[in-house]
Image (cartoon, rainbow, N blue to C red):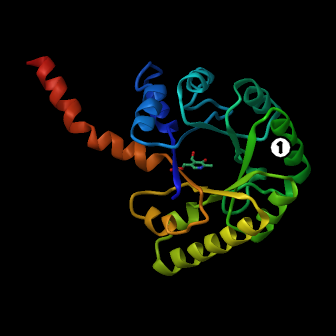
Amino acid sequence: MAMLAVNIDHIATLREARKGIEPDPVFAAVLAELAGADGIIVHLREDRRHIQERDLRLLRDIIKTKLNLEMAATQDMVKIALDIKPDVATIVPEKRQELTTEGGLEVALNKDHLKAIILLLHDGGIKVSLFIDPDMEQIKAAHKINTDFIEIHTGRYANAKLQSDQDAEFEKIVNTCKIAQKLGIGINAGHGLNYQNVKRLAQLREIEEFNIGHSIVSRGVLVGMERAVREMKEMVR
Ligand code: PXP
């Protein structure tokens, strides 16, 4: 059975819209765990547009499942990761030149740089995942530089408008899973997954963990709306 890791970045996006203290992503993480999340994911972006270092430190102390830190492959981020010690660091592209046309990491072209980053993280006892497109060249390159996991970028699958396009993307994901499994690399998947499009991927036994954020936070806002309004109505009465 696949695991679900919940990305709580957009709880922080809402907080940063007011630069205030709510909603707190740390509360959201605890609630996600109570609901059965197998892990919590945050992306500490270089521009700190949502998650802050304070969140990361509190999450490390408080959560009881796994902490997965999404990070750019920079020395500054490695320093933070070695200090916080997430269970897994997922390397994601933040700059244009680190991207393939589809949006995952360009591993082959940045092999030496990524290899050095992986070594530093491994020395700190942190497992590493590389966020890549479902592409043969990328998996092979990821394997060569000793990654523990890949996270398959499901964005193109998720955004496909035509059934035929979705089928083609699904096929690529299936093939990527087969190769990664043969190479002994752990397989995660995420980006753009929602309550509809996840069903088909959930049938792929090779995928160990789904990393999902935006659709869960979006649903959380709506399913919580009635209660929130009722409670405020009581207050103003
Ligand atoms: N995986 C990675 C590597 C990501 O960067 C993101 C987005 O932050 C996700 C998964 C989650 O994507 P979404 O918010 O679309 O579910």
Q: Which quarter of the figure has residue 60? A: top right
Kind of residue sitting beneath label 1: Ile
Residue furthest to the bottom: 164
**172 or 10: nearer the eye?**
172
Q: Kindly state the secondary structure of the residue where label 1 is placed.
A: helix
Residue at 56 percent across and 26 percent down: it is: 59
Count of marks overlaid on the render: 1
> Residue 166: x and y, percent?
52, 74
**Residue 16 appearing in the image:** no
Residue furthest to the left: 237
> Residue 9: x and y, percent?
52, 37
Q: Is residue 157 above or below residue 229?
A: below
Please give left or right for residue 25 compared with residue 111 in the image: left
> Residue 133: x and y, percent?
68, 62
Q: Which quarter of the figure has residue 55? A: top right
Density class for disc 1 (Cα within 10 Å; few <14, some 14-19, many ≥20) is many
Q: Find disc 1 in the rendering and name its residue.
A: 118
Residue at 58 percent across and 78 percent down: it is: 168
Q: Is residue 62 above or below residue 166?
A: above
Please give left or right for residue 45 compared with residue 222 in the image: right
Residue at 46 percent across and 71 percent down: it is: 161
Residue at 47 percent across and 77 percent down: it is: 162
In which quadrant will I find the C terminus?
top left
**Residue 179 appearing in the image:** yes
**73 or 62: nearer the eye?**
62
> Residue 192: x and y, percent?
51, 56
Is label 1's Cβ within 8 Å of ligand 1?
Answer: no
Residue furthest to the front: 1
